[in-house]
Amino acid sequence: MKLNLNYKTMPVLPYIQRKELPAKPGIYYIGNSLSPVMYVGLSRNLKSRHINHHRQGQFEVMENAVIRYRVLTEDFLATISDLTKTLMKLEKQAIDHYKPPINNTPVANQAKFTTVHGPTYIQIHKAREAGYCTHFEARDGDELTINSSRLPLISRAIEEQRPIFLIASGAYKDYEIAGYPHLSELLPYKKDRIYLLISRFIPYGYEESDCFGYDYVVYGGNSKIFFNPYMILNSRPGFNEFKSSYLKLGFTNCERSPFVSELLRLGDFQLLTPA
């Protein structure tokens, strides 16, 4: 079953009415009457995606901006096995066809936090379990997902709009087997267990997961991908304490660690001193 991605056939809303978007997965286009497709995006939840979009400032100053969208129907969803990969494929098709100019521009706004940070969350995964390698196919700002079963922490992260960092853990051989590229960057740490900062994002929703061993899939935006070069954590100041205290498999809050300041800095968060 194919999905019609022609903007002329899509439902449309003025951008200022984006709160009326359906809370369903789909593809969306931002534009106006002169340039109907200036930006293409995807989301597991169109409504949540536009509560705090990383390019919201650009969209709001666009004259007579509208948002067009195509919801993935239940019949279509029944034909796919991986929603995230399907959305990424559809988004790529639309981008390749329309070549929207905003997609290839840098994101201007940097996330800000005071030096009194509050909750900061990490998700650890084994490098050989390469499910999160799809993050490397994303661009900064794109919607990302992780899997977790810790609903109280998930709910708090979403409610307080706190960052989630994805960290991979494994021996050099694990990264090799998992198909990670640029392995030469990891050679200096070949005798050690290697920890890579893969991505970070701000969560805005979750839903039940069909991934074995996890109850929920958490999704969010305002993301950053650490890929080329890799962000290797092993030699970072304060990492040994952080590793021994927090780097266990799973989803956890690491706000009490002094390493949080370094993690936020690496994640390109602007740290402000409280007034």
Image (cartoon, rainbow, N blue to C red):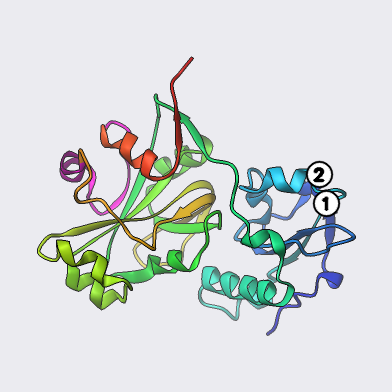
**Mark 1 closeness class: few <14, some 14–19, many ≥20 residues within 10 Å:** many
Q: Nearer the viewer, residue 258 or 38?
A: 38
**Residue 122: x percent and y percent?**
34, 47
Label 2 sits on what residue type?
A: Ile
Q: Locate residue 216: give its quadrant.
A: bottom left
Asked whether the beta carbons under mark 1 and mark 2 sit within 8 Å of each other, the answer is yes
- Residue 225 sits above or below residue 71 on the image: above
Q: Is residue 267 left or right of residue 129?
A: right
Q: Locate residue 22: give its quadrant.
A: bottom right
Query: In the image as oriented, which residue stretches furthest toward the right?
Result: 33
Q: Residue beneath label 1, please?
A: 65
**Badge 1 or badge 2: first in the primary sequence:** 2
**Residue 27: x percent and y percent?**
68, 65
Does the magenta run of residues contain 155? no
Report the disc number at residue 16. 2
Q: Nearer the viewer, residue 251 or 222?
A: 222
Label 1 sits on what residue type?
A: Ala
- Residue 234 sits above or below residue 129 on the image: above
Instruction: Determine the secondary structure under disc 1.
Output: loop
Q: Is residue 133 left or right of residue 239?
A: right
> Does any portion of residue 58 appear in the rendered image?
yes
**Residue 101: x percent and y percent?**
71, 63
